Amino acid sequence: MGAYKYLEELYHRKQSDVLRTLFRLRCWEYRNLPAIHRCPRPTRTDKAHRLGYKAKQGYVIYRVRVRRGNRKKPLAKGINYGKPKHEGINHLKFQRSLQSVAEERIGRRAGNLRVLNSYWICQDSTYKYFEVILVDPSHKAIRGDARINWIVNPVHKHRELRGLTAAGKKNRGLAGRGPKYAKNRPSRRAQWKRTNTLSLRRYR
């Protein structure tokens, strides 16, 4: 096995003494850094390369910290002047994952870069930490590389805001295949609209 394979196997055992100690130290270090900051190199080299990272010009790694927990409804004094059905305040869950939120935040911060992918690093009781791979679409090393220059196309601006990254597609229900996922394609809303629209053509 190569070195990356050993690293991958190590991360399959996240509750081992080695990784628990490592995560505890990393969380302590990252907690004292800004919520969004650039990394000199990926923390999980094997994972970053599996997700498309290359150690060359034009590729950037940013580390993002996201606060864990549900999404409390922002109402004054917790009062919802409506039907009892909509009275819930505390136990409401955000429809997307914290990973996609991390991608969104760095995507807004670094508007000149394109979000390629992201991965989990560590977490504690309050935060989750992700590293996001970004690509500079104006760099010659990217524009001249046939494997990655698809991201230069303007249609890929802010992929993370439109649910086109891997984390975003997973939240849209597009990660799976087969008959159980037929209702999710091309999107849940489009499928619902197609089945609930009565089409009365002139010649039918």
Image (cartoon, helix red, strand yellow):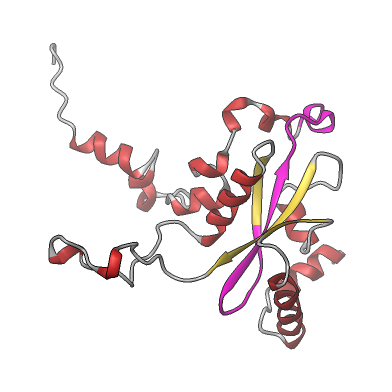
Quadrant in the picture for the N terminus: bottom right
Q: Residue furthest bottom?
A: 17
The image shows residue 33 at horizontal and vertical percentages of 73, 67
Q: Is residue 128 left or right of residue 37?
A: left
Q: Identify the residue at image location x=56%, y=59%.
A: 99
Q: Depth check: 135 or 31 in front?
A: 31
The image shows residue 26 at horizontal and vertical percentages of 74, 75
Measured along the vertical axis of the image, is residue 100 above or below residue 137?
below
Q: Identify the residue at image location x=50%, y=48%.
A: 169
The image shows residue 147 at horizontal and vertical percentages of 75, 34
Q: Identify the residue at image location x=54%, y=68%.
A: 67
Q: Is residue 112 left or right of residue 179?
A: right
Q: Residue furthest top?
A: 203
Query: Does residue 120 show up magenta in the picture?
Result: yes
Q: Which residues are magenta?
A: 119-146
Which quadrant holds residue 89? bottom left
Q: Is residue 98 left or right of residue 44?
A: left
